[in-house]
Image (cartoon, rainbow, N blue to C red):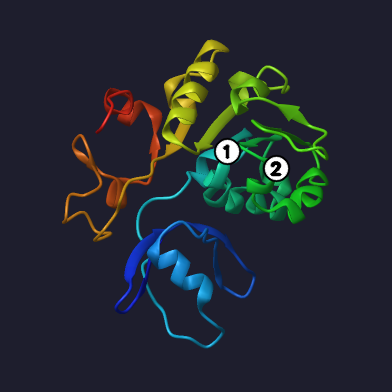
Amino acid sequence: FTEIYVPGVGEAPVSICGLEGNGILVQTVRSVGALTDYLFKMREGDLIGIRGPYGKGWPIEKLIGRDVLIVAGGIGLAPLRGVILEVERNRGKYGKLTILYGARTPSLLLYRYEFDRYREISNTEFLLTVDHPDETWRDHVGVVTELIPMAKINVEKTIALICGPEIMMRFTVKALEQIGFKENQIYLSLERRMKCGIGLCGHCQVGPYFVCRHGPVFPYWLIKKYFWVDEI
């Protein structure tokens, strides 16, 4: 992730959602607060600050030769988009790709313009769900964990990557453990209010770990003790 700031307005952490072939980092911003609202009002050529990248990302090297399961909720698809594009670019390195993605409404689904592209990646299963459909919705209705039994997952061969609201990630971990996933097969991206980005301010501390420095991506076995504790 990087820290994006506007002098006199504020600063916020934003995940990296892709790397273009020319070396440009791609980031997705949703208007949800003072800083991001201001960003949406800016014009091309206006000055913003970016520092980073910080933190640890998805364990790409551990995915080589394995099936990859992506479970995303809401804006949680943004940090996982880079993994999807990596599998697409280097298809022969990875096994089956399964993408399970859910949001509250169809309008809140990210990257809808890329969905056909995801479906065209060879050996890929892509399932969608929303909590509250509109009249045009033709896919599943319900929470994202309901997609897990619908997907064809070879548990022994699969590494699971999860990102979304914390309550969604908790239920996803439970659902994966119920079908046989072990702790070392699950990775989570935690969201905390990261200020400094280098583990000094303590705003993002989870147990002995700092999300900005030791994460935001953690193997489940490492943070299991703290993951189920509210307000930590």
Q: Secondary structure at mark 2?
A: helix
Residue picked out by circle 1: 72
Q: Residues within 10 Å of mark 1 (few under 14, many from 20)?
A: many
Q: Which quarter shows the N terminus?
A: bottom left
Q: Report x, y in % for residue 60.
A: 53, 46
Residue 173 spot, x, y in % from top left: 48, 23
Q: Position of 29 compared to 5: left or right? A: right
Instruction: Report the front residue among 32 and 51.
Output: 32
Residue 53 shows in the view? no
What is the number of the mark on residue 37? none
Q: Residue at x 48, y 44 (%)?
A: 59
Residue drawn at x 31%, y 79% as measured from the top left: 7
Q: Nearer the viewer, mark 2 or mark 1?
A: 2
Q: Is residue 223 visible?
A: yes
* Residue of label 2: 106
Q: Please, is residue 18 above or below residue 232 in the view?
A: below
| Camera-side residue of 70 and 89 | 70
Distance Cα–Cα, label 2 vs label 1: 14 Å
Query: Furthest-bottom residue in view?
Result: 45
Q: Earlier in the sequence, mark 2 or mark 1?
A: 1
Establish if 208 lies above or below 46: above
Q: Secondary structure at mark 1?
A: strand
